[in-house]
Image: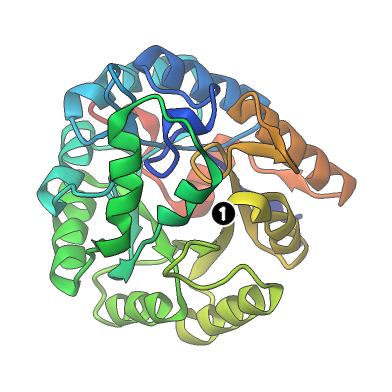
């Protein structure tokens, strides 16, 4: 029997946190590239990437913004590069797929259902903000629906999946999203092996209790059979705890400043690599080995870094 290895993903900057929340959040192309490269050197096999406006740190869907750091990350790491199609608030689906269509990466994220996505409670935790857009961005999430209709998903599967040869990190924020994924599997619009990311702790999605993690895994096993690998993203303070639980249960783990800007209670992480090293240390203590990028490519049947467009 082949020893199981854990896929460690690092999400470098995302579109949830704003520059005022941490001075260590990467914003410029140079910062994103450096953080991604360091995270890969620390052990992350998959790098999940968003782009930002270099002037003020606002999330950006611009393919040009992505292309300012993608070639550098590819050149200096062997990691699997995974580009968002979730984007950020107020981006249209058309906006959200442009970078993926341009770059044709090995992997992209794909959100499996529409949902409320509330960031506004963060406003209660801070008093000073660097940029005017930050408070507006967070407050507007009170009336924001993160759109991912069946038509939207079908389009991304066709244009990015079939058209670009990219495979997906299927992001499931609630149990119904697993049923949506099973629907596409039944229609043969997605093909095994699937890489399913269970997400806990976002206001509007399923809560971060361990019982919910167990239920999500059991539901996926019932609906998807043995056609998938699963991973866990615990938002905020749940990052390390839920990740550890997932690893013990046979899953994979995602960390990174997109998901939490902290390394421990009340202490900001100084880098993505710091979080990767901490999780890698936990896995080592559990006698679990992390997968190398070439092993992940084989496990998920990816097309290889030589077949991307950057």
Extreme residue in the bottom direction: 222
Q: Which of 177/3 is in front?
A: 177
Q: Residue at x 63, y 73 (%)?
A: 213
Foreground: 293 or 215?
Answer: 215
Residue 233, placed above or below residue 78: below
Say which quadrant the C terminus sits in: top left
The percent coordinates of residue 200 (x first, y second) are: 55, 64
Residue at the spot of label 1: 235
Which residue is painted at 24% across and 70% down in the image? 189
Colour scheme in use: rainbow
Q: For the point 27% across and 24% down, which residue is it?
A: 53
Q: Is residue 276 left or right of residue 207?
A: right
* Location of residue 215 in the rendering, given as x and y in whole percent from the top left corner: 61, 82
The answer to whether 217 appears left or right of 155 in the picture is right
Query: Looking at the image, can residue 68 be seen?
Result: yes
* Residue drawn at x 42%, y 30% as measured from the top left: 129
> Callout 1 environment at 10 Å: few (<14), some (14 to 19), or many (20+)?
many
Image quarter for residue 174? bottom left
Q: Is residue 22 left or right of residue 244?
A: left
Question: In x, y percent, where is residue 152?
Answer: 16, 64
Quarter containing the N terminus: bottom right
- Tell me: residue 27, above or below residue 214: above
Does dot 1 land on a helix, a strand or a loop? loop
């Amino acid at each position: 029997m082949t020893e199981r290895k854990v896929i460690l993903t690092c999400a470098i900057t995302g579109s949830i946190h704003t520059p005022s929340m941490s001075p260590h959040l990467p914003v410029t192309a140079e910062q994103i590239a450096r953080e991604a490269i360091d995270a890969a050197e620390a052990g992350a096999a998959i790098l999940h990437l968003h782009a930002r406006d270099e002037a003020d740190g606002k999330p950006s869907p611009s393919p040009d913004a992505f292309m300012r750091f993608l070639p550098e990350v590819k050149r200096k790491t062997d990691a699997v590069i995974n580009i968002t199609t979730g984007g950020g608030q107020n981006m249209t689906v058309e906006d959200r797929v442009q970078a993926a269509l341009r770059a044709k990466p090995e992997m992209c994220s794909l959100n499996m259902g529409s949902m409320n996505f509330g960031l506004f409670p963060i406003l209660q935790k801070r008093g000073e903000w660097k940029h005017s857009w930050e408070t507006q961005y967070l407050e507007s999430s009170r009336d924001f629906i993160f759109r991912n209709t069946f038509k939207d998903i079908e389009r991304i599967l066709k244009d990015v999946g079939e058209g670009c040869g990219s495979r997906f990190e299927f992001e499931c924020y609630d149990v119904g999203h697993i049923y949506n994924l099973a629907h596409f599997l039944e229609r043969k619009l997605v093909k095994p092996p699937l890489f399913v990311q269970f997400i806990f702790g976002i206001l509007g999605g399923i809560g971060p209790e361990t019982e919910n993690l167990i239920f999500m895994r059991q539901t996926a096993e019932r609906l998807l059979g043995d056609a998938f690998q699963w991973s866990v993203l615990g938002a905020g303070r749940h990052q390390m705890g839920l990740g550890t639980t997932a690893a013990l249960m046979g899953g994979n783990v995602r960390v990174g400043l997109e998901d939490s800007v902290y390394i421990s209670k009340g202490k900001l992480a100084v880098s993505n690599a710091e979080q990767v090293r901490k999780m890698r240390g936990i896995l080592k203590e559990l006698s679990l080995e992390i997968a190398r990028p070439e092993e992940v490519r084989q496990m998920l049947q990816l097309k290889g870094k030589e077949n991307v467009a950057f």
